[in-house]
Amino acid sequence: MKAAVDGGALPLPPADLLSDASLFIDFDGTLVDLIDQPDQVVADDALIALLARLLDRRADGLALVSGRSIEQLDRMLGPIAQRIALSGSHGCEHRWNGILAHPVRPAALDDVEDRLRGFAGAHPGVVVEPKSFGVALHYRHAPAAEIAAHEQARLLGEMFGLAVQPGKMVVELRVPGGDKGAAVRRMMGRPIMAGTRPIFIGDDWTDEAGFQAASDLGGFGVLVGPLRETAALYGLPDSAAVRAWLGGEGA
Ligand SMILES: O=P(O)(O)OC[C@H]1O[C@H](O[C@H]2O[C@H](CO)[C@@H](O)[C@H](O)[C@H]2O)[C@H](O)[C@@H](O)[C@@H]1O
């Protein structure tokens, strides 16, 4: 793993590395900017057009790998989501060619959601996001609640046997098992991706497992955002740069 260097930056990924590659792309913070309210994120027309162009050029060599559930990705992306290989819920669920594989939703998640709503009620600004296989507690609007939110998540994780998944200004209780690295390995096992070089593009700590898997399988990671300790080889500053790089492929 590369150490963070103050003021430094990873090299920009060369466009010609996109040929013969399979693309694994994170969603929030990578294809769309982070915003305050998780349920107000939209996949804009330019993004849908970019995904359509990528599908035209590489068909089965495109995958989205997100902490969002597949149900959320479907809602945000609309019909094009059915044409893209998807890994949702931090590597816990997958869908390609119309076939969905997912774990059993733990009944405890309903109880956990109630308890997290109680926590949010006592911490103004904290937002609860129910998901297919988890419940997220967002404190972007209430940064002072960070430590208490993580402690609450730790306690509930222990109590109900759920995984605690930290992210950017969020902590989530979710089905244990799976991560973005496992998702990359699983998808790269498909004959359609055999022999291609995996490129994983992401911004969050959860994307590090994806960077590592891509690197282990002969490809590389692209870190979006400021330099930090990372397994990524290249860097891009923000989602606009990601879109520009993807859009200019082959240029
Ligand atoms: O793996 P990703 O596709 O990056 O999803 C990770 C989480 O993204 C969302 O939360 C993040 O984006 C929100 C909207 O911009 C932002 O308000 C929040 O602070 C970020 O953590 C999503 O809500 C989560 O469910 C995903 O796990």
Image: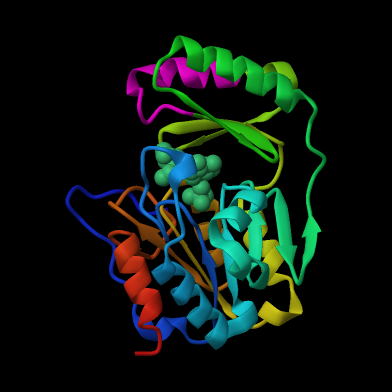
Whole-percent x and y of residue 87?
A: 65, 57
- Res 225 quadrant in image: bottom left
Q: Is residue 52 left or right of residue 126?
A: right
Q: Nearer the viewer, residue 138 or 25?
A: 138
Instruction: Tell me, yes or no, whether the highlighted magenta stretch contains residue 146.
Output: yes
- Res 163 quadrant in image: top right
Q: Is residue 60 left or right of residue 223?
A: right
Q: Nearer the viewer, residue 187 or 130?
A: 130
Q: Nearer the viewer, residue 63 or 213?
A: 63
Q: Is residue 239 left or right of residue 55?
A: left
Image quadrant for the C terminus?
Answer: bottom left
Whole-percent x and y of residue 125?
A: 39, 22
Residue at image coords 66%, 50%: 71
Per the rendered image, the range of residues in magenta is 138-155
Whole-percent x and y of residue 4?
A: 29, 48
Asked if 192 appears above or below 179 in the picture, the reply is below
Q: What residue occupies the far bottom of the structure in this picture?
A: 251
